[in-house]
Amino acid sequence: MERAVVDHTRGARGQGAAAQNPLTVMTEPCDGQVGTLLPETGNQVEPLVGPGVEIDEYGVDVGHGVADHQRARPSDTPHGDLQLAGEHEVVAHQGHRTWLWHELIIGVREGARSRQTALRDKPAAGDPVMQINTVGIVGAGLMGSGIAEICARQGLRTLVAEADEEQLAAGRRRVAASLHRARERGKLSEEEVDQILHDLRFTIDLDEFAECDICIEAIVEHLPAKTELFARLDRIAPRHAILATNTSSLPIIEIARVTSRPERVIGTHFFNPAPVMKLLEVVRSIATSDETLDETRRFGELLGKHIIIAQDRGGFIVNLLLIPFLTHAVRLYESGFATREDIDEGMRLGCGHPMGPLELLDYIGLDTALFVCDSLYEEYANADYAPPPLLRRMVAAGYLGRKSGRGFYEYESSPAD
Ligand code: NAD
């Protein structure tokens, strides 16, 4: 292990007095990196003061401002080096100063690569892992109803909360319809469907989540709505409970910071339809603990999902790649370049996609897609993520896709029926 001794009485540009009150900073997780930073940057400051230290001197909030400026350049990639600065500004408010600094050193030099390595670290075999018996799902729309179904199908006690009685009834109908479809396909027996419906508990009283081991939020993709909910869940759920969000694009750390347990907050990004799609993208913020990551991974595996681990960057892995594809398809259609059918058939028959991009947008829900575009554009300031004007107009018109009966195509019934 290596220690870097840094004189904080000096400015990062070496104008201060000699070291009299040196601050010792542990650099164990990035052994040797502080020293090796200097030759690469050509920085003329004294030894052991690399760019991470410099940002720390300026203040992480200033570093974030620089990152904001930098990322606006078209050549910047969403996973570029300076992205970490934004994340650390958030954590700085919580006072993890030494850790914060270490991460910045890694972040500026190595960017996403170092973080990936950290994400793969697992607790040692034999570490105690929390038993998950009761799951609470908030929101019983397209995603929440599907997540509730897969939890209940695994025999977990599953509570489902909605905003009001009307939405709750729609959520219950969605789950029942999906279970009956599974029965028709021979995946479930009549008795199993009855048992699962019996085991699911629907409520509009969030206080019932006081007995949950994990809460999974699947409400509207809107940060203020999610942070308000997480502040409530934090007060209600037991101290040991994991608080998970199904967000498609919002920063997990922004959600975690409103709770008193940021280390227990994590992203669990299921795919639509949740009972069918194999993937679960688990998203770890810089505050998420190894235990939380490991327990969430095991929970996902228990649900029969294949787990991939993503960083807390807008869009994670899948939507970072998918959203530009979808928005380009809308722009093709909007410009009159091709018909909706030809665009969709092109990708289905030419590329083997199960659905064309416009069909997929209808399936996802145009309102949700618009929220995701907005938040990715906010994160990266990159035109690939900007919502096409047609998408915004369709949402304003109430053309939300399958769930409203009309999107790029027309539908006779919504999935809730
Ligand atoms: P949806 O509009 O179908 O459902 C959202 C539900 O949340 C609604 O039923 C609404 O009544 C309920 N709700 C809103 N505020 C609530 C509150 N405070 N308390 C309880 N219930 C509340 O949306 P969706 O498509 O299910 O998306 C939900 C989340 O999952 C979003 O974050 C979205 O980005 C994400 N997601 C969506 C998809 C997709 O394909 N639609 C895929 C992966 C992730």
Image (cartoon, grey):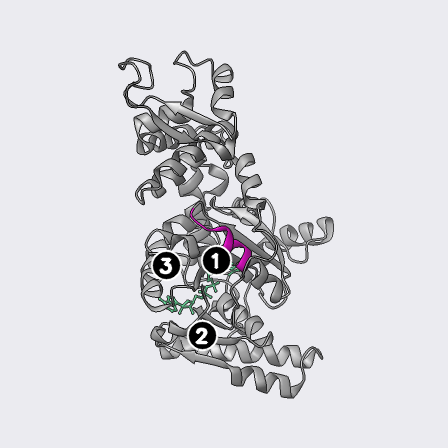
Residue 417 visible? The answer is no
The CA distance from mark 3 to mark 2 is: 16 Å
- The answer to whether residue 199 is above or below residue 20 is below
Q: Position of residue 8 (x, y in %)?
A: 30, 23
The type of residue carrying mark 3 is Lys
Quick check: is the Cβ at mark 2 less than 8 Å away from ligand 1? Answer: no
Q: Which image quarter: residue 193?
A: bottom right
Question: Which is more N-terminal, label 1 or label 3?
Answer: 3
Q: Residue at x 52, y 29 (%)?
A: 31
Q: Residue at x 48, y 58 (%)?
A: 366
Residue 319 colored in magenta in the image: no
Q: Nearer the viewer, mark 1 or mark 2?
A: 2
Q: Position of residue 312 (x, y in %)?
A: 47, 46
The type of residue carrying mark 2 is Val
Assign a secondary structure to mark 3: helix
The CA distance from mark 1 to mark 2 is: 24 Å
Which residue does the numbered mark 1 point to in the structure image? 366
* 143 vs 120, nearest the viewer: 120
Quick check: is the Cβ at mark 3 less than 8 Å away from ligand 1? Answer: yes
Which residue does the numbered mark 3 point to in the structure image? 226
Q: In terms of secondary structure, what is the magenta stretch mainly?
A: helix
Question: Which is more N-terminal, label 2 or label 3?
Answer: 2
Which residue does the numbered mark 2 point to in the structure image? 160
Q: Position of residue 108 (x, y in %)?
A: 46, 29
The residues colored magenta run 287-295
Tell whether label 2 touches label 3 (CB within 8 Å).
no
The CA distance from mark 3 to mark 1 is: 19 Å
Q: Left of 94 or right of it: where is 402?
A: right
Q: Residue at x 49, y 20 (%)?
A: 35
Tell whether label 2 touches label 1 (CB within 8 Å).
no
